[in-house]
Image: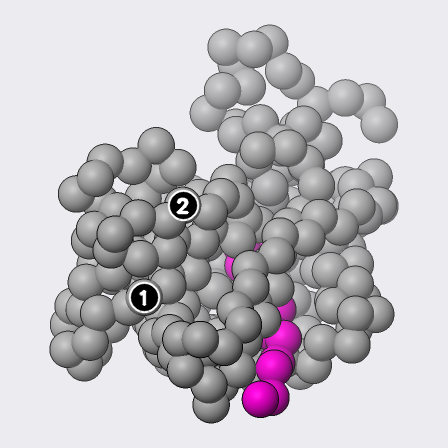
Amino acid sequence: MSLQRLAVVSDVHGNLTAYQAVLADIAARGITRILNLGDVVGKGPRGSACTALTREHCEATVRGNWEVVVAGQGELRSEGQAWWRRELTEEDRRWLFALPGSLDLQLSGRRVRVLHASPADEFTRVLRGHSAQEFAMMFTPTPFTGGEERADVVVYGDIHDPFLRSGREGTLVNVGSVGNQLDDPTPSYVILDGDPEGGAEAPFGIQFVRVPYDVEAEIAATRALGMPEAGAWEIELRTGIYRGAHAARGLTPGAG
């Protein structure tokens, strides 16, 4: 039996300070294999630096919706999207857009599928309060995931809201977000434990990890770089509350 541990991170969103803290935590645990579930860029100010760290430390990365929007050639819808695209190098954009949409691996006799949002594409969102139909869909093979095999475990990001749910179809794991957590402000990632060569009787584990970081340092870097939409970003980093709810809650950027 040869048990291995893999760290799974997602939704860094250009938050370099949080990413460095999470990578340091992973290294301190002696974990050398890291998978990244996309949205490395967008929303935060240092997408290019986070792309470089991803290429250095992650053995595999899948493409998120922000890679499609910011790294692709499509029309941009806001000043912020244009800024995040300009912040990337041409090589950053080429690499990010060429990432696969989905990857499968074997751990303890289980087919583990990692992707950003769902087997439909990078944009089809499945929330914590999903329907039974959405839950079942997450394990189904599609043209997007390739192949014809159902997954036993699906690990995804996108919604910035970590949870685990098991059912007859399989086990669904959302790893949360490194750079833009929205259940509370503290970044999260997941550790998978299993035997790549073992059968279903081999040990298999899923662990959620939270990593505090210097939020104010990231906010200061954002202000220094003059990023558009910095006010909403600042509130999200401090509170873990999505920007669409800021006005209703009377939230405005602090003086800092």
Q: Nearer the viewer, residue 3 or 31?
A: 3
Asked if residue 11 lies left or right of residue 116, the reply is right
At x 52%, y 14%, the residue is 247
Q: Is residue 234 above or below residue 21?
A: above
**Of the residues under marks 1 and 2, which one precedes in the sequence?**
1
Task: Give the position of the N terminus as an image quadrant.
Answer: bottom right
Q: Which residue is mark 2?
A: 165
**Residue 77 in the image: x percent, y percent?**
36, 45
Asked if residue 226 lies left or right of residue 245, the reply is right
Q: Is residue 72 above or below residue 234?
A: below
Q: Which residue is mark 1?
A: 152
Asked if residue 37 lies left or right of residue 216, the reply is left
At x 54%, y 48%, the residue is 176
User: Which kind of residue does numbered mark 1 sit on?
Assistant: Asp
* Residue range highlighted in magenta: 1-12
Q: Residues within 10 Å of mark 2 (few under 14, many from 20)?
A: few
